Image (cartoon, rainbow, N blue to C red):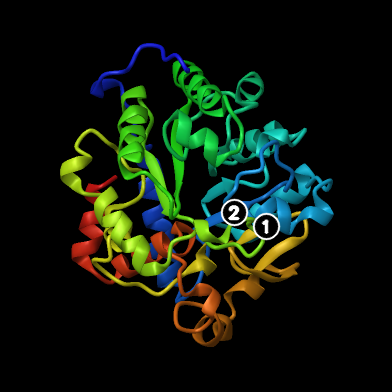
Amino acid sequence: MFATKNIKDASQTQSRPIELSIRLGWYLIKNRLKGRKRFPLVTMLEPLEMCNLACIGCGRIREYKPVLDKIMSVDDALSAVNESGAPIVSIAGGEPTIHPEIDKIINQLIERKYFVYCCTNALLLERQLKKIPPSKYFCWVVHLDGMEARHDESVARAGVFAKAVNGIQIALEKGYRVCTNTTVFNDCDVNDLRSMFKFVAELGVEGSMVSPGYDFQDAPDQDLFLSREQAKSVFRDLLNPEENIDSRFYNNPLYLNFLRGEKEYQCTAWSNPTYTVMGWRKPCYPLADEHVSDVKDLFEADLWDNKYGVGKDPRCSNCMMHCGFESATIFHAISSPKDWVTLIKSR
């Protein structure tokens, strides 16, 4: 059983830096004024695919099994981020904290004033706290798929939840920004997830990111994944405002409405180009029909007008991931004053 330290009151809860919202808003306007239809919002960086867990819903370590020993160099990582040009960098994998120079990658990105989010299972988090100083430009994103029993079952190892919670508390005490990230599967316990969202809000995190899982072909249990209609039903229940008064979600409210089935969008996964040890995943974060060396290949009109997206490729039919649809809500809001105001108010 895990033990928690002091729970924070609401006044101590973190909030995302206002500079992030201002810079992202200006970045969007600037690119639209230049006439660009497709451009990146977030660079997804996977500096290695090796992991110290084997989560039942993850396809990455199985998809990249032949290259699990490959490690991206610091220069390659920085070059990819520069090539993409997005103001936000999300570091995933694999487990990024295994990378022997992840601190150098993160510290140099912070120095260049990118907003960096590092996804982690937190098993090695404390080790990295000694190498990466707190910054408004940096946020740990800790994976939690429920309270202790459910999360440990999801990652197939006992004790991981307790380790993650301890890491969150230590990071918060040291002044780091911290969020959590939750993937929702077919066998989820809605009440357990609500308890977890409330629990981490009380710890003082900035918010909880939430998304349905994508049915990666290499994941060992395909029955885990929700169909599109199943996902809407689950999220209508899970995200019921009356049941989440004490929770704090990091996703924008337009995306949460989308998850509840209140509005439809077409995927804009091109806005989250993903760079791995094999190059840029084409077409997107969930799908890699090939890897390419030029990020511009991911913005080709034919890819998104004719080949990929809901109703175009059957592999896209159930996808509701935030990498493709949270960005869609943002791009739609540019031409909708009402939605734009909603985003601004939710900062």
29 left or right, relative to 39:
left
Kindly indicate the quadrant of the structure image that contains residue 54: top right
What residue is shown with label 2? 44
Toward the viewer: 334 or 170?
170
Residue at the image position 38 percent from the left and 30 percent from the top: 205
Are the residues tagged 2 and 1 within 8 Å (C-beta)?
A: yes
Residue at the image position 54 percent from the left and 44 percent from the top: 114
Kindly indicate the quadrant of the structure image that contains residue 127: top right
171 left or right, relative to 107:
left
Toward the viewer: 84 or 309?
309
Q: Is residue 200 above or below residue 250?
A: above
Residue at the image position 24 percent from the left and 24 percent from the top: 10
Q: Is residue 140 visible?
A: no
Kindly indicate the quadrant of the structure image that contains residue 196: top left
Three-letter amino acid code at the position of disc 2: Met
Disc 1, SS: strand
Q: Is residue 264 visible?
A: yes
What residue is shown with label 1? 275
Residue 180 in picture, x, y percent from top left: 44, 37
Three-letter amino acid code at the position of disc 1: Tyr
